[in-house]
Image (spheres, grey):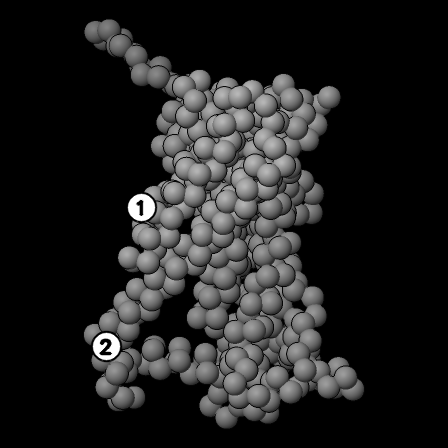
Amino acid sequence: MKHILEMREKRAKLLKEAREIHQRSVDEKRDMTAEEEAQYNKIMAEIDSLKAKIDREERLLKEQQEMEERTDRMVGNGASGGDDQRSEENRKKELRELAFRAYLAGGMQNLTPEQQAEMRALSATVGNQGGYTVPEGFYNQLIEAMKAYGGMRSVARILNTATGNKLLIPTADNTAQKGRILGESQQIQPSDPSFGQTALDAYKYTSDLILVPIELIQDSAFDIEAWVRQKIAERIFRITNEHFTVGDGIDKPNGIVNAAVVGVTAAATNAVTPEDLIDLEHSVDPAYRNNASFMFHDSTLKALKKLKDAQGRFLWSPGLTVGAPDTILGYRYTVNQDMPQMDASAKSIIFGDLASYWIRDVMDVVIVRFNEKYMDYGQVGFTAFSRHDGDFINAGGNQIVALQHADS
């Protein structure tokens, strides 16, 4: 904790130095010299590096706390007192996870009869074709790994379903309805809200083929489960995050950029002003601004860090206390590399209650192990399938808006 605080204090000092360099050129009404530009960029790179380290440290601290809490719960349930004291549910869960790890490392022939029974229980249907649904522990870690990459999963509302049937989300727009004064013996009048619905499907995604040399699989020091999980998370995250961000909704998720209404049109094709951001902020109803945040590409963040308000104060502010986020205009933000960069007609900045975007995950993630197909190369193949969808659940209040640049 002390180490994190020290890094935040160092960030604040570096930020002050960078702003002094920038301010000199502003006061003297000139561009920064090449030397100043190089020094400024070096300081900002160090600030970003410290931010990444702080995020890692805070994430490790959070995971350690969660692990300790899980351990405490297990001890409280008598899990440390041997098999006789464990609940049947905990024993089954542990057996499934151990069986799945053994399956990844050596296939079905590597499993004990009891473990084989558990694997078949996990996936009675696809198991006959050599594929198996992942146990809950693996699934939760897979989703957590995808969330850790940032982007859409860190801000959207996540909905888990056990099946992939079309899911209809009801919406009701009551924003135009008001109460009224009723006179004596006067009859009340109907005033119904406008109802609608948004459908979430379950598009099938794949990690494509992941090839692992048998030397690594046979090496007891190599954690095959963690490695496969990481590669699945990276590949599924990249394509789904792209679709959740800029998908057009045609045979794929409807991305947040496509779904967001335009709140502000910037006059410039490749820049924004403080006034643009303020107008964007106030294009969202105050009822939704309490949970509002920004989303944009890292190149956009670089430009926003240099903006000042009418009093000469920077719009960007670093979080200086443990757990405090960096902010723009006092609102937290998410850097999403699938967001459009500032360009003509591009929606480069999203603002609003981003949890109004829903991501649907179908829990039956399937992994197939190819034991012999690639053995002539001394490799074992893995592939994963998972189903997802996403859309903006808009009840009519336009909780999410976009800043769009001029077309020319």
Closer to the camera in the image, 212 or 325: 325
Residue sitting farthest toward the top: 183
Closer to the camera in the image, 327 or 242: 327
Q: Secondary structure at mark 1?
A: loop
Where does residue 33 sit, x and y in percent of width and height? 61, 33
Residue sitting farthest toward the right: 376
**Residue of label 1:** 321
- Residue at position x 62%, y 65% from top? 385
Amino acid of disc 2: Val
Amino acid of disc 1: Thr
> What number of labels is visible?
2
Q: Secondary structure at mark 2?
A: helix
Q: Which quadrant holds residue 189? A: top left
Task: Report if residue 169 is visible in the image.
Answer: no
Q: CA distance from mark 2 to mark 1?
A: 34 Å
- Residue at position x 33%, y 53% from top? 6
Quarter occupied by the C terminus:
top right
Q: Which quadrant holds residue 328? A: top left
Where does residue 60 sit, x and y in percent of width and height? 38, 63
> In the drawing, does residue 377 fall left or right of residue 110?
right
**Neighbour tally class for label 2: few under 14, some 14-19, many 20 plus, Cα within 10 Å:** few
**Neighbour tally class for label 1: few under 14, some 14-19, many 20 plus, Cα within 10 Å:** few
**Residue of label 2:** 75
